[in-house]
Image (cartoon, rainbow, N blue to C red):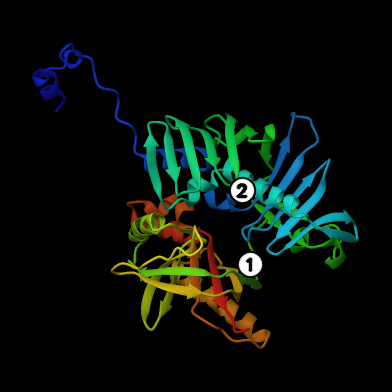
């Protein structure tokens, strides 16, 4: 085609042999390249963070700790320690007391949580809709805009949370994790993650007066997720249900397809997709909520929308090392025994949650690689219980 253009066009530049610019790289390919360079195969580990922010390399740090449940603890030398855990928002006064956060303080903590996750590429990992705006800009859902220079991330901007700009990244062959960033309204900060495997004790997000242990531990390098069942509150949302395609590549394609339709319908993600079975049928679900109050999503062919109310669920991460189905069976047995021990009963189907976009090997053309990933990837199981 280039020969035809050069020989047949009336454009003087083309006739003189001047080449057209290199075509812009597809947006999804840019995002995947950035994620692979920055996080490699460790993407899921960055769903919960323990990081330090400093004005200088030897300055006093502000620490931000946030887990997979959305809880966040920010400790600043000048402002003290602020914690937000769902409806609970408090400042630590001393070892035995706390006070409620003011609305502005709570908003500042939630903004810092969003910025911390953005610095470690969460909007890129979670986006269901990836659209190019121009040669150096990509829209990630409706929440974030990525500025990039070739395969190097430059800036993430959100109308709700502000901007984070990467000023210095790690150099290959090391992962390209952020070393220095600029936060809109805060300024430049040196940043480092305290470890790529982090475990928070529950007391980390509890009020001092409620703790059984006054000095909660942060474990670096230990197991990241609960290996024993716990009860968790699952917030209300809607489910977009489609038939489970049955293979990981097909599931990823379906999530992209239906996630794009939700995005166009003014809806946004309410958590990672999951699988469940009902009446001998398997379903793939994308949880979502409306971006604007009163905006309703109309299901199209092959889709079903369900309302999921706030529920309590028993939660555990399936033991790894076995085949995927065997892991689910083992985890379900653990949840059934846990729920029965509290004299409660299941209140709905088991939800099998895999953070698909943080597991790039699930997209491999090799069935062996996909099977290996399914044996070791994080698999969260949620079993709703009757209140």
Image coordinates of residue 239 in percent, x first then y, are 45, 69
Q: Is residue 69 above or below residue 145?
A: below
- Using the rendered image of the protein, determine whether residue 169 is visible from the camera's viewpoint: no
Q: How many marks?
A: 2
Quadrant of the drawing holding the N terminus: top left
Image coordinates of residue 306 in percent, x first then y, are 44, 74
Residue depicted at 25% across the width and 22% down the height: 20
Residue depicted at 38% across the width and 44% down the height: 131
When asked about the image quadrant of residue 98, the answer is bottom right
Q: Residue furthest top?
A: 16
Q: Which mark is residue 256?
A: none
Tag 1: Cα neighbours inside 10 Å, few (<14), some, or many (≥20)? some
Residue depicted at 58% across the width and 53% down the height: 47
Q: Residue furthest bottom?
A: 343
In the picture of the structure, the residue carrying the numbered disc 2 is 114
Label 1 element class: loop
Label 2 element class: helix
- Using the rendered image of the protein, determine whether residue 286 is visible from the camera's viewpoint: yes
Image coordinates of residue 65 in percent, x first then y, are 70, 50
- Left or right side of 376 for 265: left
Q: Residue furthest left?
A: 8
In the picture of the structure, the residue carrying the numbered disc 1 is 227
When asked about the image quadrant of residue 248, the answer is bottom left
- Left or right side of 263 for 22: left
Q: Nearer the viewer, residue 64 or 325?
A: 64
Q: Of the residues under marks 2 and 1, which one precedes in the sequence?
A: 2
Residue depicted at 12% across the width and 20% down the height: 9
Quadrant of the drawing holding the C terminus: bottom right
Tag 2: Cα neighbours inside 10 Å, few (<14), some, or many (≥20)? many
């Amino acid at each position: 085609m280039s020969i035809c253009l050069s020989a047949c066009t009336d454009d003087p530049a083309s006739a003189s042999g001047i080449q057209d610019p290199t075509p812009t790289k597809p947006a999804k390919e840019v995002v995947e390249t950035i994620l692979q360079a920055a996080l490699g195969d460790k993407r899921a580990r960055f769903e919960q963070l323990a990081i330090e922010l400093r004005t200088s390399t030897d300055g006093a740090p502000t620490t931000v700790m946030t887990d997979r449940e959305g809880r966040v603890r920010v400790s600043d030398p000048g402002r003290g320690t602020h914690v937000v855990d769902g409806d609970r928002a408090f400042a630590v006064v001393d070892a035995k007391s706390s006070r409620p956060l003011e609305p502005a303080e709570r908003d500042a903590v939630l903004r810092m949580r969003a910025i911390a996750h953005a610095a470690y590429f969460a909007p890129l990992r979670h986006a269901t809709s990836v659209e190019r705006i121009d040669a150096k800009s990509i829209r990630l859902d409706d929440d974030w805009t990525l500025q990039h220079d070739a395969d190097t991330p430059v800036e993430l901007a959100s109308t709700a949370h502000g901007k984070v700009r990467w000023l210095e990244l790690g150099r290959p062959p090391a992962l390209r994790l952020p070393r220095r960033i600029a936060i809109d309204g805060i300024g430049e900060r040196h940043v480092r993650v305290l470890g790529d495997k982090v475990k928070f004790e529950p007391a980390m997000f509890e009020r001092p007066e409620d703790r059984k242990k006054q000095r909660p531990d942060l474990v670096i390098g230990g197991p990241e997720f609960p290996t024993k069942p716990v009860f968790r509150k699952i917030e209300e949302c809607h489910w977009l249900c489609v038939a489970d395609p049955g293979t990981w590549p097909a599931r990823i394609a379906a999530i992209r397809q239906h996630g794009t339709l939700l995005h166009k319908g003014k809806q946004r993600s309410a958590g990672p997709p999951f699988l469940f079975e009902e009446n001998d049928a398997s379903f793939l679900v994308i949880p979502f909520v409306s971006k604007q109050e009163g905006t309703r999503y109309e299901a199209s062919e092959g889709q079903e929308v369900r309302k999921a109310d706030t529920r309590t669920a028993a939660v555990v991460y399936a033991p790894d090392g076995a085949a995927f189905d065997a892991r689910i069976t083992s985890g379900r047995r653990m949840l059934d025994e846990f729920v029965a021990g509290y004299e409660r009963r299941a209140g709905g189907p088991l939800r099998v949650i895999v953070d698909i976009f943080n597991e790039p090997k699930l997209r491999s053309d090799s069935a062996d690689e996909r099977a290996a990933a399914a044996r070791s990837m994080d698999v969260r199981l949620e079993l709703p219980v009757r209140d």
